[in-house]
Every structure is written in structure tokens, then in C-alpha cells.
Image (spheres, grey):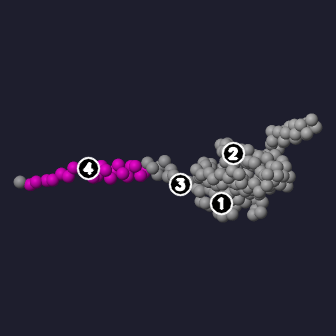
Amino acid sequence: MLSKKLILGGAVSALAFVCAPAANATDFPVGPPGSNFFITSGTPTSDSITAIFYNSFTSSTNFDDRFLFTIPQNGTGSGSISTSFSDPNNSLVIDDLIINGVHYVVPTTSSGQSISLGGINIVANVQNVIEVIGHTIGANGYSGTATFTAAPEVPEAATWMMMLSGFGMMGAFMRRRRVSLTFA
């Protein structure tokens, strides 16, 4: 009877831990190398930027990590995130991955979780957010990479109008009838 109470008590404790709300969000803006979110190649104004983001934990906890960045040009993002399970007593589970408000499921295997994504719309001069929500059992961590590629610049409306007018004038000159004069 005592062992049933211990098992039931342990199950209730585990369920309470897993179902507990995530801790307050921790924000990580882009920082210097060695911080939780830093650029490894390029600058915020480059056409191509690569960054690393990660977090590690020394004990069981719930977490809600937000990696924040603003870029002065439009483009697309891609990247990956992964965890590894070396021991069931030291595992990290990503419950939700949210990038700019879009939720992604991170598949789980027997050795951890990982996902690679691409084609993510990155908007200029707006705070973009990579949010990782999950929990740990024991000590563990996750890591990811994020890559940004600037969109090619689109000509302004006045440039398009000038180009279309030029094509129209060329067409008009090419269609013009040739008049031949004959003298008697």
C-alpha cells in the first residue's frame, strides 16, 4: 500500500512539473561573442548574416527564452535548433518554437530534438523574435543557428514607369509606317 502511495505521489509531482506554466520569458538581444545570442558572420546591415543562439541549464526548470533582433532590410531567414538526450535524467524538451508569431513543432527522436527551417519572412525595422519554450529534467541545453539573406531591392514606382514608357516609345517607333516618296 505504501509503494502505491509513493508511486502515485511521484506521478502527481512529475505531472505538476510538466504541466507547470513556463517561467517568465527571458529576453536575449544580440550581444557580443560568447553571449546567448551573437552574430558569427556579417553585420546587421549586411546582405547575409549568421548568428548563434543557445541556453543551458544546471537543474530542472521550465523556460521561455526569446531571442530578439532588428534588421534594417527585408529578407528571409533560415536556421536550425537541436537538443541531445545523453541520459533520461538530464534531458531538455522544446515544447514550442515560435518565430515571429508562427508556431513550429520540433520533432523528437530517441537521441533528442532537431528541426531545420527556411523561407521565414524577416521584416525590416521590426523586432523579430525567436522564442523557445520548454522544460529540462536535470542539467542540459539547446543550441541553434539563424541565417538572414536580404531580399533584392525592388525598383521604385517612378523607375518602373520610366522603363515602361521607354518600352512604349520603342514599340511606337518600330511600328511607324515607312512613307516612300515617288517622283514622276
Sequence-first disc among 4 and 1: 1
Sequence-first disc among 2 and 4: 2
Q: For the stretch drawn in magenta, what is the main secondary structure?
A: helix
Residue at point 25% right, 50% down? 176
Residue at point 59% right, 59% down? 47
Residue 4, image quadrant: top right
Query: Which of the two discs, 3 and 2, sits closer to the camera?
Result: 2
Mark pair 1, 3: CA separation: 20 Å
Sequence-first disc among 1 and 3: 1
Extreme front residue here? Answer: 1
11 left or right, relative to 37: right
Residue 50 marker: 1
State the residue position of label 2. Answer: 98
Residues drawn in magenta: 162-183
Badge 4 amino acid: Arg
Badge 2 amino acid: Ile
Crowding near pointer 2: few (<14 within 10 Å), some, many (20+)? some
State the residue position of label 4. Answer: 175
Q: Is residue 45 magenta?
A: no
The answer to which of 58 and 108 lies nearer the viewer is 108
Mark pair 2, 4: CA separation: 57 Å
